[in-house]
Image: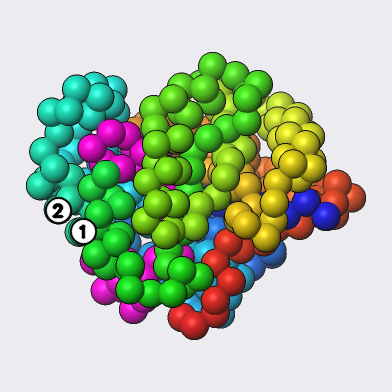
Amino acid sequence: MAKLIICADDYAQSAAIDAAILTLIERGVLTATSCMTLSPRWPESAKSLTPPLRKQADVGVHLDFTQFSQTLRCPHALLVLRSLSGTLSKRAVTDNIEQQLDAFENSLGSAPDYVDGHLHVHQLPVIRDCLIKVMQQRYGQLPVAERPWLRISSPPVGSGLKARLIHWLGAQRLKKLAQAAGFRISPLLLGVYDFEGNAAAYQAHWMQWAKQLKQLALTSEPEKELPPVLMCHPARPTQKVDPDDPIAIARMVEWQVLQSADFSAWLGISDIQPVKGQMKDSH
């Protein structure tokens, strides 16, 4: 079977998102979730991430510089421009990263299982260098298998222009930095799409991602690297759509597909095995 880390982003952003993610972890569909630890909801949301749940799924930090960030926050396009031009303050970036890791550890009593980024900001210039330095300082003394792993946002070639742009903004450089520092990485990222369409369209995307996963499985070296990650963004339906969430409708469509018994059956038929990246159960 092809192993796959199925990761839901944006935990603690809203009650509807949290409810969907927790349900899908309990059902064995999701095997990872990325947390927005500067969200006002985080202290309450963290209470649901119990030790038994963390045995079912990796729980990571979803580094945020655009939504709930306190030390440094700006629109995504401006953040990209400032990172590419080298005008981001390394001190402010470092402080922001430290705040998010502190919030995670203070609530859950352990290091995160992994780190990724909201809108993939963790692999932008300046941010990625600060991130690796902070992770070395905080976790470098741990055995390699117990250190947080890093999600590399590198979709397979042929995944479209959006996917190529995500890769171009720093995937290869972050991969090299992480490996040189002794942190494990997920080699590839599936799940990139335009957030448009109905349930049938989202199911069609999964069919394509399954094909890509099988192709990757033929060339990967499982003993040397983590499985690929497939990111998703489910949320339970709500009566009022959040006007500040640009993918609010897509979240509900994803939930419609992921929670269905047909989807769980399809995973088995397609020989896809949802797995964790972090195998230690010492939380």
Residue 214 in view of the camera? yes
Q: Residue furthest bottom?
A: 282
Question: Start and end of the magenta stretch?
Answer: 102-128
Q: Kindly identify the residue that appears in the image at 32 percent across and 34 percent down.
A: 124
Q: Is residue 22 above or below residue 153?
A: below
Q: Is residue 179 left or right of residue 124?
A: right
* Residue 243 place in picture, x, y as percent: 37, 31
Residue 5 in view of the camera? no
How many numbered tags mark residues here? Answer: 2
Task: Name the amino acid, label 1.
Answer: Glu
Q: Is residue 124 above or below residue 11?
A: above
Q: Quickly name the residue at label 1.
A: 98
* Residue 67 place in picture, x, y as percent: 27, 40
The N terminus lies in quadrant: bottom right
Cα gap from disc 1 to disc 2, whole angstroms: 5 Å
Q: Kindly identify the residue that appears in the image at 63 percent across and 47 percent down.
A: 228
Q: Is residue 150 left or right of residue 134?
A: right
**Residue 201 colored magenta?**
no
Task: Name the amino acid, label 2.
Answer: Asp
* Residue 72 place in picture, x, y as percent: 15, 41
Q: Kindly identify the residue that appears in the image at 10 percent across and 47 percent down.
A: 91
Circles 1 and 2, Cβ within 8 Å, touching? The answer is yes
The local crowd at label 2, few if under 14, some if 14 to 19, many if 20 or more residues have their Cα within 10 Å, is some
Q: Say which mark, if any, is on residue 45.
A: none
Q: Residue furthest front?
A: 180
Q: Quickly name the residue at label 2.
A: 95
